[in-house]
Amino acid sequence: MSSLKAAITAVQGYVPPDLLTNSDLEKMVDTTDEWIRSRTGVEVRHILKGEGLGTSDMAVEAVNGLLKKRGIT
């Protein structure tokens, strides 16, 4: 049997600061806040805004937070 080689010692996440509300969606598509809430329960969601930004940019933020949390430079 092999010995333990790795362990999870910390967990970190990241959510973008910009918000998209149901009210915002009402202005973009034919829907209502009530319709969205009754079917999904969602009132507001965090979205990533910015030219050329993607999921890898959110991963970088999460990893940087994790490194800080663990005291790793």
Image (tube, rainbow, N blue to C red):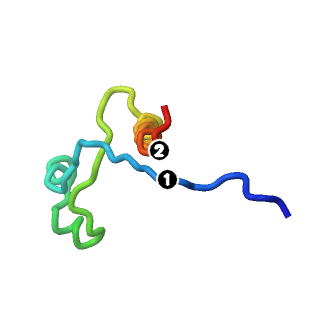
Residue marked by disc 2: 70
Q: Position of residue 27 (x, y in %)?
A: 14, 48
Instruction: Indicate whether 72 appears above or below 5.
Output: above
Observer able to see residue 55: no
Q: Is residue 3 left or right of residue 11?
A: right
Q: Residue at x 62, y 55 (%)?
A: 7
Observer able to see residue 45: yes
Q: Element type at marker 2?
A: helix
Judged by depth in the image, the label closer to the viewer, 2 or 1, is: 2
In the image as oriented, which residue stretches furthest toward the bottom? 38
Residue marked by disc 1: 10
Q: Position of residue 52 (x, y in %)?
A: 39, 27
Q: Residue at x 43, y 50 (%)?
A: 12
Q: Residue at x 30, y 44 (%)?
A: 47
Instruction: Indicate whether 2 appears above or below 46.
Output: below
Q: Is residue 58 left or right of residue 19?
A: right
Viewer-closest of 58 and 73: 73
Viewer-closest of 60 and 34: 60
Instruction: Indicate whether 31 appears above or below 27.
Output: below
- The amino acid type of the residue labelled 1 equals Ala
- The amino acid type of the residue labelled 2 equals Arg
The CA span between labels 2 and 1 is 7 Å
> Any mark on residue 24, and which?
none
Q: Residue at x 21, y 61 (%)?
A: 43
